[in-house]
Image (spheres, grey):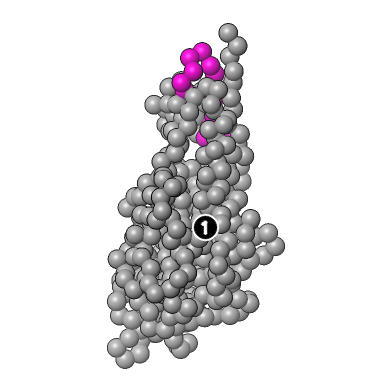
Amino acid sequence: MNHRKPLIAAASVAALLGLSACSPPVLEVEESGSHLQSGPDQSGSQSGAQSGESSVALTDEQTERIVAEVQAAVDLSDKEKSAEPLAERLVNPALDMRAGQLTRAEKTSTELAPLIIGNAVHSATVGNSFPRVLVVASEASGDDPAEVFFLTQKDAKSDYMLENWARLIGGTPVKGLSVRDGSTVVDGSTTGLKVTPSDAVATYVNFLNNPDNEEYQLFEDNSFEPRYREERSALSDAVKVAGTVSTQAREWDAPVIGVLLETGNALVSSSFKYTETYTKTVEGSTFELSGTPAAFMDDPKVDSTVTVDYQVNIFFLIPPEDSDDPIAVVGAERVIQGVKKG
């Protein structure tokens, strides 16, 4: 009997990792040195200078110090090749994302891509309520797209923690990154938007699992979903002589948090996960994984089933409820989180 041996190409498995290089950014970071804030520039504690009953935006100096402290934790983690230092200044989903990147670099014996928290632009929520969000963004440079980072402070005595970040991808251009003056934090249940942020995440995950779902008409996504769909198709073609592959996206307990921009849109971040399940169905065939998933395995052969888990951190731009504009997928980061034989 002729044993046919399909291999899953590393390029197919890694397709989503190149998302942001393929499209112009949705949120265009303005010129270097532009500091867009939601209040006057005054001195104050880490939680912001106080003015009467409300707290104004962080000063340039405060923002620079916060970013430097978070960057130091990331740099120490890189130096020690350990996720342990990250817990000092990162929380989920950023914590699991960076820890996953560390593990991937170790498993594949590749260089860890640096995580540089730029603050060419920064803006913050204000008021006495918590949590608070500090948004910082880097500039695009050459083939490297701009990146947006969400740092959150849960109470006045807590440090700002890096909660999420993403490279910007294609969609409807929006100039600037200024949080609306006096804006408080947008959470999963915030109303006044086209849909609540939690519903946006749930609907998007539902669409990934059911591409014919009419609810997806709410979204404009020129990068993530098309490449996700292309990857699924390529994987199915690659394994069909020996088995099958299915993909299932799901929500997890990642926070849904955002800010209301001066444009009236809400910039919202969250995270979801998905699992690729490889099943050998052709008796006598040889079925092996390759690329990054294989690096997580002692033996890359699929004898029965193998599951590969991924985490995707995602940013949406959600318009006001009376807007005709679609919800835009504006940024995404993906990392492999584990491989298990069934």
* Magenta segment: 280-294
Quadrant for residue 145, please give it: bottom right
Is 290 above or below relative to 40?
above
287 in magenta: yes
Residue 142 located left or right of residue 282: right
Residue at coordinates 41% horizontally, 41% vertically from top-left?
Answer: 248
Residue 323: percent from left, percent from top: 43, 73
Most common SS among magenta residues? loop
Residue assigned mark 1: 221
**Where's residue 23, x and y in %?**
62, 59
The residue lying toward the viewer, choosing from 259 and 218, is: 218
Front residue (pair 1, 259):
1
Identify the residue shown where x is 46% and y is 89%. 40
Q: Residue shown at 54%/18% (left/top)? A: 286
Q: Is residue 334 visible?
A: yes
Packing grade of label 1 (10 A; few <14, some 14-19, many >=20) is: many
* Residue 130 coordinates in the image, percent (x, y): 31, 73
At horizontal 37% and vertical 72% (from top left) the residue drawn is 321
Up/down of 5 relative to 235, above or below: above
